[in-house]
Image (spheres, grey):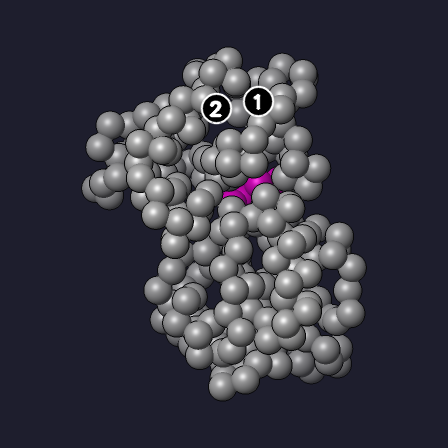
Amino acid sequence: MRVLLVEDEKRLAEDLVETLGAAGFVVDVAEDGKSAWFKGDTEDYDVVVLDLGLPQMDGLSVLKKWRAAGRSMPVLILTARGNWTERVDGIDAGADDYLVKPFQMEELLARLHAILRRSAGQATSVLTAGPVELDPRQMRVSVGGSPLALSPLEYRALHYLMHNRRRIVPQHELLEHIYGSDDGRETNALEALIGRLRRKLGTNIIETRRGFGYTISVEGETAPEASSTTS
């Protein structure tokens, strides 16, 4: 899952990058409001962690500009000020949740997972597809109840596909969300990764739609329709 972290406090930003990376996220960082607005307006993120007290453009203004432009990615606001009027302003501007500094990293991760779950219309925290279960909070995957060891990249790919199981995910999108936009990986690296993941899962839940991308397909369920987007 790809997250945009907008934070100008260098030490906190470094700690957040480490925590989010260890939790399976691909992290892009912006240190001021203008660069945050540009990244959020031109790149696709699964979720944004947005500080309000930013140089060049405050976080609330950044959020308002995103929403006015139709950018709908979930946003978790961070602030050093905890008064209720500011929280109301943030929610009214389009924030999905609010966290007051200082905070525990475990709470931040729990709130991010809850936001992602709501954005995907999921009722429970554990993602399920046939015999496969993925717990994002524990970063655990099991098949038929038996634990399965995956590499970080394999986990990211499976998590993203299961999170988006109601649609076909183009190859270029999956590349960006598991490697990052600046990695430069080619589609053959992704195909090799998916091949390894299929072998480990031992089940055909990852379906390739030639010319379109990948989707989670479970026997007995209606498969997503292919759109005009190419991979």
Q: Is residue 24 above or below residue 142?
A: below
Q: Position of residue 160 (x, y in %)?
A: 48, 39
Crowd tier of the residue under label 2, counting other residues whose Cα lies within 10 Å: few below 14, some 14–19, many 20 or above: many
Magenta stretch contains residue 222: no
Crowd tier of the residue under label 1, counting other residues whose Cα lies within 10 Å: few below 14, some 14–19, many 20 or above: many
Q: Which residue is located at x 22 percent, y 32 percent? A: 211
Identify the residue under disc 2: 197
Magenta stretch contains residue 121: yes
Q: Which residue is located at x 55 percent, y 69 percent? A: 6
Q: Which residue is located at x 35 percent, y 29 percent? A: 191
Q: Position of residue 219 (x, y in %)?
A: 44, 16
The region drawn magenta spans 120-124
Give, as a three-letter code, the residue at label 2. Leu
Identify the residue under disc 1: 132
Residue in front for this viewpoint, 160 or 29? 29
Give, as a three-letter code, the residue at label 1. Val
- Looking at this view, name the residue that lies furthest to the bottom: 56
